[in-house]
Structures are given as C-alpha cells and as structure tokens.
Image: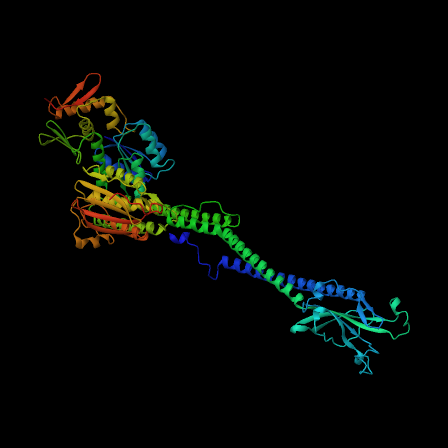
C-alpha cells in the first residue's frame, strides 16, 4: 500500500507531469531570453544616446567659451564647468585644434595642404595632461557634429564629438584693429572614456540577469506547484481505485473535477455492469439446475421400486446425470465467480446464518455446534455467495462426519483470513487427504453427499488466491483450514488466537 | 397425519402424493403459491413439502407469510436450488428441513417422519405407549410384540393419537388430520374408527373425555 502515498517518479515517457513541466519550462526560458535581449538593447541604446548628448553639451559649452585673443590665438573665456576636465586622465577631455594656423610659429614650416597646416592640440583640457588626442582627419561642415572613436591616454578608448568653428570676423572689440585678417578655423573636440558607456550597461545587464533569474526560478516553482495541484485529482483517483481493488469500496467514491468525473462515472457503470453479469450468470446456472433436476426427480421416482432392467438402468443413469449436473453446475458457479472488484463480506453473519441452518438440517443428530468468538472486523474480500458456498460445504461435511461436536474459529493472520473447522469424527488418514480434494471422491460412501463438497471449496478458494488444507483436529477428527483474502481496512489487526 | 404438498411440476406432484398416501398420510396438493398460502393458512397440516420456484408467489414468501401468521407446522423445502445461500435463506424464512432435487423418495419420507416426530417432541421413530408400539418408519403397530392389522384410516387415527399421546384430541382435530381436503368428511366415521381401534387394542388405552374428545394414555 505504500505505493499509493509515494509520489510517482517524474521520469517516464507518458508522464503528464513531464509534458506540462517541459512546455512551461520552454516558454519561461524563451520569454526570459527575449526580455533580457530586448531590455538590454534598449538600455544600451539609451546609455549611448545619453553619452552622446553629454558630449554635445560639453561641445556646446566649449564652443560658447572659445574666443580668439589679440594675437589670434584661441583661448577659453571661461573654464568648462565639469571638474573632470581639470582632473588628469579623468576620462573626460577636450581639445582645440587650429585648422588654419597661418602665421603661427608651429605651422610655419608646413606648407601646401590645409591638413599640413593643422596644429593639433593647440589648446587642451588639463585632464589630458601632456597627451594629445590623435583625431582622424575630418572636416565637418559648418554646424555639423561628427562622432569618432579614438585612442585616448592610458590605453583607453574614447568616444568623441567634434565640430569646426570659423572666425570670419573679429569677435569683439579687441579684434577691431585686425578686421581683414585671414579667417580662422578651429576644430573643437570633446571626448569621454568609453567605459562610461560600457560600465552602466554591464552593471545593468548584471542586475537584469539576476532579476530575470529570480523571476524564472519563481515561475518554475509556480509551474511545479500548479502541476502538482492540477494533477492531484489523478492521485486521488488512483487511491480510490486502490480501495476498490482492495475491497474497501464497491465503487469509486469522492468528488472529482469536471474533467475527470465522466471517467469516474463510466468506471462505476462498468463496475456495476460487471456485478450484474456475474449475478445473471449465477441466476442462469440456478435456473438450469431447476430445469434439469425436476425432470430427473420425476424419472428417478417413476423408476424407483420397479425391479425391471429398464427401471434399474433409469435409476442408475439418473444418478449419474445428477452427479454430472451437480459437478458442472458447481464448476459454472466457480467460473461465474469472477471476482467482482470491491466485493466484501463480513464473516460473522455468514457463519451465524450457516450454523443456524446446520442446526436445523442436522437436527436429527445431537450435535454441538460451537462458534468461537470472532473479531467483528473479520471481512472476506469477495462475494457473499462464494463465501457461503465454501463455508456451507465445509460445515456440512463436518456435521456429517462429527460424532457430537463441530467447532469453528477464525482469525486474521498477516492480512489473510484463517477459518478453521474442526470435528470429532473419525477424520481422514493423512495419505487419503489429497484424494478427498479431487473430483467426486468420497472417503466414506456411507455418508450421503456427492463428495464434491471439498473439491469445490478448494476450487473456489484457489480462485480467490486462498488455500484449503486438511489436518488432524485436536477434537479427534478432521481439521479443515481455509485461508482466504481479507478485505482491506482490517489488515494489520489481530484477531483472537 | 395430514401433509400438504406444494409442487408446480404435475408429474412430480402426483408421484409425491402417491408415495405419501402409500406411506399412510392424508395428502393435499397445491401447484401455485396462492393456493398453497390459502391451504396452509386455513387447514391444520402435520407437515408441508414446499417447492421454492412456484408460480404467482414464490415458496419463500409463502413460508414467511405462514410463519408471520403463526402457523408452526414443520416445513420441508424441496427444491432444485442447492446453493448454501438459498438453504440459509430458506431456513431463516422458517423452514425446518431442506432437501434438494433429485432426491430419493425414501429420504424424503424419512425426513418427513423425523420432522413430524420432532414437532410432537419425540426423539425416536418408534412411538411407545404402554404395551402399544407404533413404528412410523413402516406404519406398523404392535401390542406386546404382536402386529395389529389396521386399515389406512385406522392407522392414521392411531398415529395421530400416538404423536399426541397424553393429550386430549377433539373429533374436529382428528377429522382435520386424517382426511385430505377433498375427502367427504363425516365426524361420525371418526367414532367408527375409534370403536374399531378399541376392539383391536388392550382396553383403557383410548379414553373418551366427555365433551372434549379422546385421549391415548398408558394404563396405570
């Protein structure tokens, strides 16, 4: 019975549990992967936009603060507000290149192309210290901002924004005296360490994976719980079926969900039909008996008392026919006794009824019939008719053989019903006991009966997985020990003795 | 001794009735449950042979109704159904014995005799009253070992008195138990039978109790 409470193994080809869990697991994994990818991309995009917006803000500020002094040298009217520009290698840098440094001392040696006249790093943020940003050659049109990636100081990679500013006219009073000087162009560069771009994304991704991981585990546990709760009625169904098989119940009992209830109802219908078929088979066997035995009685009575050869033949053949009918009817009863699932029969009322009957049927002889007290819970796992047939034959035999006393006792032994019938007759010699169980053998032809009794009991007992054994009785006669399956619920209890 | 046979198979009914009459009983027959119920309820029988599979009302129901109405006569069930659950329900319905078909007529007769005897409180098949002995097994009466020659009606009267010896039996009782239902009853013939029996028996064995009836009693 332990298998009823054990959880079934999760493995197995046909497992509903595995199917449901595998499906759920697939969808949880897919949606978490898609969510991770989507959120991570969105955030990376957002960080990049921020990064570039910041660079542009700094560039705008740089542009606004740029002036040209009396010597035509660029200079900043005000320091840029972000303190990182003052901190060496802080990761935030600016640089102003002089694109047309004509007349300037550094560019004087160079001649020809505009590029050749570029003076890089004319003005740089303090944070760049002595480094100069090596900017790829580019010439953004007026008002355009271009972005590049460049190598920065201390082996960093920088993201940068640049624009070109031209001074065509003097910008302030101080330049008034040089109104026709050559136009000046400066390339303004603001750069920031790309780690500013990568680090937030990395830490966001870390947090994201953690959160999604927790979510995934949570969903998985929820799915597991759901599957267990959802499939719980199936376990209950199995328990109910076990009870029917044990004989603890006649039908599937309990409330089941609407999806399972039709199955339960159908099964109960099948159980009921099964019992009906067995009952009908019995009735038909009984009807056949009635139909055959009455004409046999008439024949036998007509021939009795007549000494002609024909009459003697009829009497003999009727006797043979009666034995055949008894034998085959008894077998038909045994065959019809297909164990109806869930059948259970309390032992005590059956024994009491049979003893009442025996007292009447054997009233001509002064027999003492003793029933030792039984545990009330003793219950046979099977049909009442079959139990009556087995015990009836045993008791009738004992009463026929006993000289004065028949005793019946029963107890439970390791889940088996042990019924013991003793008589104080002459018993059966050990060597003959096997023969008595065989068809039609009578140990003593003096005692009326067909001799089928014990062999039918043996057949019925075997059909129920029981056993019939003969032994010497302490009363002096025969002890018949009938072992039968007990109905569930009584298992484990100990009867008297 | 008067017996009711309830059996729906006509041939078997005839055989039973013939055998029982030959054994010295007065016999009535019924072939369905309604008749059986009526007969058993209105007439006094010393025993009933009852088949279970009957038209209209089944044998078990008939038996139950008799017992509920207080009819206590011995009933022997004679049926083809030999399952123990049928025997138990038959006995629990009030039957006194159960015999399954096919049967030997001798066994039926022996069981009937035993039933009637036990109903009268007698253990032995030989009823003894003083010098008179009646062997119910072969319907013979002897006085001091000398066999008496009796007609069947004389035997019935004597057997009935022997089963109820030391009791006062009214003439009506005697009439009811020695004649079958369809017999032309005349209570005067009872007096004729008693007179003939007195001639064949030692004097004083059959007393006349004035206004009540007769009593069989051992002299002394």
- Picture quarter with the N terminus of chain B: top left
Say which quarter of the image contains residue A374. Answer: top left
Say which quarter of the image contains residue B91. Answer: top left
Vertical relation: A193 (above or below) A348: below
B60 relative to A363 in the view: left or right: right
How does the figure colour the protein chain or chains? rainbow
Q: Nearer the viewer, residue A447 or A123?
A: A123
- Percent of width and height locating residue B125: 16, 34
- Picture quarter with the C terminus of chain B: top left
Q: Nearer the viewer, residue A454 or A195?
A: A195
Q: Residue at x 18, y 18 (%)?
A: B209
Instruction: Kindly tell me whether residue A86 is visible in this rendering.
Output: yes
Q: Nearer the viewer, residue A89 or A211?
A: A89
Say which quarter of the image contains residue A120. Answer: bottom right
Instruction: Kindly tell me whether residue A295 is visible in this rendering.
Output: no
A24 relative to A10 in the view: left or right: right
Q: Nearer the viewer, residue A206 or B6?
A: A206
Q: How many marks?
A: 0
- Percent of width and height locating residue B7: 31, 38
A5 relative to A51 in the view: left or right: left
Vertical relation: B30 (above or below) A128: above
Q: Residue at x 53, y 60 (%)?
A: A22
- Percent of width and height locating residue B30: 32, 34
- Percent of width and height locating residue A39: 65, 61
């Amino acid at each position: 019975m332990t298998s009823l409470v054990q959880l079934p193994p999760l493995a197995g080809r046909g497992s509903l549990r595995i199917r449901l869990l595998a499906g759920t697991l697939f969808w949880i994994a897919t949606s978490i992967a898609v969510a991770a990818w989507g959120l991570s991309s969105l955030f990376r995009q957002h960080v990049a936009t921020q990064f570039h917006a910041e660079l542009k803000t700094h560039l705008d500020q740089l542009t606004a603060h740029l002036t040209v002094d009396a010597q035509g040298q660029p200079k900043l009217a005000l320091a840029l507000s972000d303190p990182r520009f003052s901190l060496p290698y802080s990761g935030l840098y600016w640089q102003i290149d002089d694109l047309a440094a004509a007349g300037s001392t550094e560019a004087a040696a160079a001649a020809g192309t505009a590029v050749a006249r570029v003076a890089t790093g004319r003005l740089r943020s303090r944070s760049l210290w002595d480094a100069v940003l090596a900017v790829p050659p580019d010439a953004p049109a007026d008002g355009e901002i271009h972005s590049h990636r460049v190598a920065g100081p201390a082996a960093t990679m920088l993201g940068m924004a640049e624009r070109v500013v031209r001074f065509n006219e003097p910008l302030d009073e101080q330049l008034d005296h040089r109104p026709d000087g050559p136009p000046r162009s400066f390339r303004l560069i603001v750069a920031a360490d790309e780690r500013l771009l990568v680090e937030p994304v990395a830490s966001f991704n870390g947090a994201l994976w953690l959160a999604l991981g927790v979510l995934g585990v949570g969903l998985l546990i929820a799915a597991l719980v759901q599957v267990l709760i959802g499939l719980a009625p199936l376990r209950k169904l199995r328990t109910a079926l076990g009870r029917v098989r044990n004989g603890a119940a006649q039908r599937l009992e309990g409330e089941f969900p609407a999806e399972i209830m039709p199955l339960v109802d159908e099964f109960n219908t099948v159980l009921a039909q099964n019992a009906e078929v067995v009952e009908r088979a019995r009735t038909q066997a009984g009807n056949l008996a009635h139909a055959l035995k009455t004409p046999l009685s008439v024949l036998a009575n007509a021939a009795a008392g007549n000494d002609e050869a024909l009459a003697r033949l009829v009497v003999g053949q009727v006797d043979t026919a009666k034995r055949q009918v008894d034998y085959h009817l008894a077998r038909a009863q045994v065959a019809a006794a297909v164990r109806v699932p869930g059948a259970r029969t309390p032992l005590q009322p059956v024994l009491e009824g049979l003893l009442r009957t025996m007292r009447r049927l054997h009233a001509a002889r002064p027999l003492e019939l003793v029933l030792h007290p039984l545990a009330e819970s003793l219950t046979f796992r099977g049909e009442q008719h079959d139990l009556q047939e087995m015990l009836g034959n045993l008791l009738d035999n004992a009463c026929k053989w006993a000289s004065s006393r028949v005793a019946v006792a029963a107890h439970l032994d390791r889940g088996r019903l042990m019924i013991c019938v003793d008589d104080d007759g002459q018993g059966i010699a050990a060597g003959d006991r096997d023969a008595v169980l065989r068809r039609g053998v009578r140990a003593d032809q003096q005692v009326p009966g067909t001799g089928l009794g014990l062999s039918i009991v043996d057949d019925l007992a075997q059909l129920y997985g029981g056993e019939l054994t003969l032994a010497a009785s302490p009363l002096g006669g025969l002890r018949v020990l009938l072992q039968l399956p007990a109905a569930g619920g009584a298992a484990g209890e100990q009867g008297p003795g | 001794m008067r017996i009711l046979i309830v059996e729906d198979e006509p041939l078997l009914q005839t055989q039973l009735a013939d055998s029982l009459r030959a054994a010295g009983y007065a016999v009535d027959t019924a072939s369905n449950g309604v008749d059986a119920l009526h007969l058993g309820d209105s007439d006094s029988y010393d025993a009933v042979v009852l088949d279970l599979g009957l038209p209209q009302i089944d044998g078990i129901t008939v038996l139950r109704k008799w017992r509920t109405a207080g009819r206590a006569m011995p009933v022997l069930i004679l049926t083809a159904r030999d399952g123990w659950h049928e025997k138990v329900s038959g006995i629990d319905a009030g039957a006194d014995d159960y015999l399954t078909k096919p049967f030997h007529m001798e066994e039926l007769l022996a069981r009937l005799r035993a039933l009637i005897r036990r109903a009268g409180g007698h253990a032995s098949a030989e009823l003894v009253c003083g010098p008179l002995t009646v062997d119910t097994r072969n319907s013979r009466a002897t006085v001091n070992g000398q066999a008496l020659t009796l007609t069947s009606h004389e035997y019935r009267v004597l057997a009935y008195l022997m089963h109820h010896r030391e009791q006062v039996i009214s003439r009506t009782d005697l009439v009811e138990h020695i004649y079958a239902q369809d017999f032309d009853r005349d209570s005067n013939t009872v007096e004729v039978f008693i007179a003939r029996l007195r001639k064949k028996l030692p004097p004083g064995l059959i007393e006349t109790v004035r206004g009540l009836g007769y009593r069989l009693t051992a002299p002394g």
